[in-house]
Image: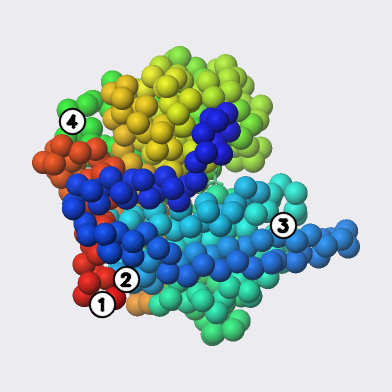
Amino acid sequence: MPEGSGEHVSVFETANAQFDRAAEVMELDGEMRTLLKSPFREMQVEIPLRRDNGTLSLYRGYRVQFNGARGPFKGGIRYHQDVDMDEVRGLAALMTWKTALVNIPFGGGKGGVNVNVKEINRFELERLTRKFISRIGHILGPYRDIPAPDMNTNAQVMAWIMDEYSGRHGYSPAAVTGKPIALGGSAGREAATGRGVVMVFEEVARREGWDPRQMTAAVQGFGNVGSHAARFLSEIGVKVLAVSDVSGAYFSEKGIGVSRVWSHNARNGSLEGFDEGEKISNDELLALKVDVLVPAALGGVLHKNSAGRVKARVVLEAANAPVTDAGGKVLEGNGAYLIPDILANSGGVTVSYFEWVQNIQQFTWDEERVNAELAKVMARATTQVWELAKQRSVSMRTAAFMIAIERVAEAERLRGI
Ligand code: NAD
């Protein structure tokens, strides 16, 4: 249940409600609907961790392979105390629609461990990661299922995953993406999700006749996605009035210096103590009078209660599932323009695909090429979604799902059920 919402919401139910609306418009037959909403394989494992103080902690790890009709399962691994099977299943479903929408040859998967990373140290984190991979490794692989970073996992965690997997199968950089560059990671991967968020926004703005230089934004979350999204937004002239992380939000009517936030975050490992502007709560950030609200942290933050307080006219969904189904109805009812997650944050998995391609071909691209290819994919997907939404008079989300569902359904039909 999202905090303060009083609304029972599961990420999987949210993803399915979004699916159903698109399936209805497409008049998709009932059998295909049932098939496409069913996860292919779900795995749950116990992860015992011997702590440095000698005690034993038990965690639960999950990997859901939702749909692989269009290629190997693809999706991040999240470390968070609230991770459970429903969340991982819902995020795996969203990955299926995301990879299909940007038309890269992958299916959808997701993984997670219910660990609070603040409670364990770096060495314990490494042991936990290796144990998790040793227990799910037999369903992973470059042509089976390829993990990537998500909340609280990063290039270092991906390096341990690659090492653990390679120890059993031989050198396998293509088994995981989001790796450090020294181990076969791609130039541009770290910034790719945030960069893609802003590329999608720019394309929508161009088509809608908005001038980014006249617009203001608030960004929730200053991790991989939020920090880069804030940087690229300010680079195209959007004035960023507020940023936040788990420590709270920082707001200035005159605009926050994004590069100063970056330096503070790099020095302190969090925004805590940032002394520019006024400190407000994350809830207050969501209700700020800005043009663009960018939720880039947890899912479910814009639920039926908080959505009613949103004053932004554009919600740019950088996080996965930041808007619940009821929250979406409230926002749309109030005339907000929603740029859906499966489009807005698809830059990360797109560059993960480029990383996989480079690993398989053993040929590296420079950052210029990565960014140019990313720009092409983001512009193509945004154009397709925007045009279909106009043609069929549906939301951008429904249009995005329609395109994705059509592609996965076609692959299912062709492969034979
Ligand atoms: P991250 O761990 O790098 O950063 C998360 C940020 O959110 C941190 O700044 C953290 O302090 C902040 N945060 C956590 N709880 C918060 C709260 N209650 N209120 C405000 N801020 C809070 O994670 P990330 O990789 O940036 O992922 C963020 C979101 O984007 C997730 O929904 C993730 O699934 C999605 N996403 C990530 C990628 C990727 O490539 N990393 C790709 C697509 C989508």
Residue 70 pos. (x, y %): 30, 69
In the rendered image, which quarter contains the N terminus? top right
- Mark with earlier residue (2, 1): 2
Crowdedness near tag 3: few (<14), some (14–19) or many (≥20) residues, C-alpha within 10 Å: few
Q: Which residue is mark 1?
A: 415
Q: Residue at x 44, y 48 (%)?
A: 13
Residue 385 appears at what percent x and percent y? 21, 46
Position of residue 370 measured from the top left corner of the image (x, y, whole percent): 32, 58
Discs 2, 1 touching: Cβ within 8 Å: yes
Q: Amino acid at mark 1?
A: Arg
Report whether 411 appears left or right of 228.
left
Few, some or many residues within 10 Å of mark 2 (<14, 14–19, 20+) = many
Q: Which residue is mark 3?
A: 122
Q: Which residue is mark 2?
A: 69
User: Looking at the image, is mark 3 or mark 4 earlier in the sequence?
Assistant: 3
Say few, some or many: other residues with alpha carbon within 10 Å of mark 1 (under 14 / 14 to 19 / 20 or more): few
**Amino acid type of the residue that numbered disc 2 sits on in the rendered structure:** Ala
**Residue furthest front as drawn:** 30
User: Does residue 167 appear in the picture of this structure?
Assistant: yes
Q: Give the CA distance from mark 1 to mark 4.
A: 39 Å
Tell me the CA gap for discs 2 and 3: 37 Å
Give how far apart the Cα atoms at labels 2 and 4 are. Answer: 35 Å
Type of amino acid under label 4: Glu
* Residue under pointer 4: 208
Residue drawn at (26%, 56%) of the image: 404
Q: Is residue 369 visible?
A: no
Q: Quick one: quadrant of the C terminus?
A: bottom left
Q: Tell me: is circle 3 under 8 Å from ligand 1.
A: no
Direction from residue 243 to residue 364 in the image, left or right: left
